[in-house]
Amino acid sequence: MSTSIGYSLVKSHGSYASECGYCKSSEDTSHKFGLSAIMLTCQDYQDLIDRGWRRLDATKFHASKSQRQLINKFNRFLEGTYVPSNENDTDSNKDKLKSRKRTENTFDLVEAIHEAEGRVDLKHKFKVTTELSSFTQEKYQLYYKYQTIIHNDTELSEESFRRFLVNSPLKHEPQVIPIASGYGSFHQCYYLDDKLIAVAVLDVLPKCTSSVYFFYDPDYGYLQLGKYSALREITMTLELHTAGLKDLHWYYMGYYIHNCQKMSYKGQYKPSDLLDPETYEWYSIEHCTRLLNQYKYVSFANPLSDAQYANHETSRQCAENIDLPLPGMLDPNKVTDNDIKDMMVYIDGAVKHFNNVSYFNHFGKKYLLKEYYAAVGLELAKKM
């Protein structure tokens, strides 16, 4: 478990089912294996998210026409030629910002994102800062306003905000890159005329920038800050890669639930890939959506025929009260004692080999280790 910066310490919560907060299901349709991290190296987190989620290669990203227009509109707002109260954009000085005339062939994402940033000759002053995740009253008040207005969330507190978006088990790992603060958990703060209007919560890892959460002032909803932030984070990923972090060129947008309308926008950032839940190989989202339109669950590498899928669904429904391995998990019942022989556990304030802890000699307790092994795989089971 030892590395140059220590080890990862996680707590397994096992498999369980619950209602889906994204789909607002009335039944326990969300099946998951839960882990909570006490300490986590950035590399181990990278390996964990590579066992799920979705990704986009920032070096191959091409902004669509609507995405180019969104950036241009944002820049025009800063310039003062886009008036939100007027349905017809007012272009009082059409040549002031070059971005308005760009076509797909001449559009430069990095240049466009930064074009109006830090300008003193525009109507509005805009700046973005990136800092290690931290608590401030300004951030909390913005979060409170966003949650109550956008999500009708009334059960809020400073402590819950800290747990959700400030406290991080990731250990900061500095990198010798001028524009980078290293790997770890960060807040990217958007300031308009010196007022905090949005915060992107990001994890920067050895191979990717992972988008955790984004909250903004609903008064500025007309700027489509959620979509704008994704383009800015893709830009940040590209800049980190260009600056010398050559392995870091992926942008992760988190979960993708195909039939959840709130997540449909994620497929608009291309080229995007989804991970096959069985083979852990990546497939283009165009390939995946065709199959996901047809099946509730599918392996992109080995899709079932309609008859096979019907039999598969029937067998799963008949066995709904039986613990079945989740998609992407090994069957814990097929994990042998030899498979878990090198696993370490944290108990009584020390890291110990599980064979030296009598607590795990009981079959039921040993099964918990086998279930954990089945969920995270051989390499991570040995390290975490």
Image (cartoon, rainbow, N blue to C red):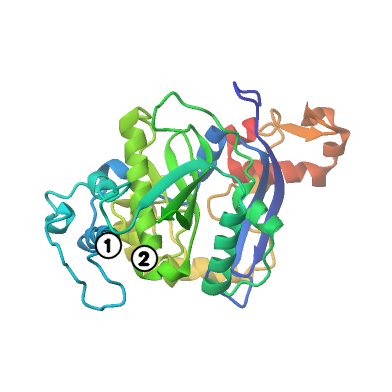
Q: CA distance from mark 2 to mark 1?
A: 8 Å
User: Do callouts 2 and 1 mark residues in contact (Cβ within 8 Å)?
Assistant: yes
- The residue at which mark 1 appears reads as 70
Residue 150 visible in the snapshot: yes
- Tell me which numbered mark, 2 or 1, is placed earlier along the sequence: 1
Relative image position of residue 112 (x, y in whole percent): 24, 49
- Residue at image location 72% in from the left, 35% down from the top: 337
Q: In the structure shown, which secondary structural element does the residue marked by tag 1 occupy?
A: helix
The answer to whether any part of residue 279 appears in the image is no
Q: Please state, as top left, top right, bottom left or bottom right, where the C terminus lies in the image.
A: top right
Give the side of residue 164 with respect to residue 88, left or right: right
Q: Is residue 355 left or right of residue 229?
A: right
x%, y% of residue 338? 69, 31
Tell me if residue 224 comes above or below residue 245 in the rendering: below
> In the structure shown, which secondary structural element does the residue marked by tag 2 occupy?
loop
Which residue is labeled 2 in the image?
224
Rendered view: 181 above or below 187: above
172 left or right of 257 in image? right
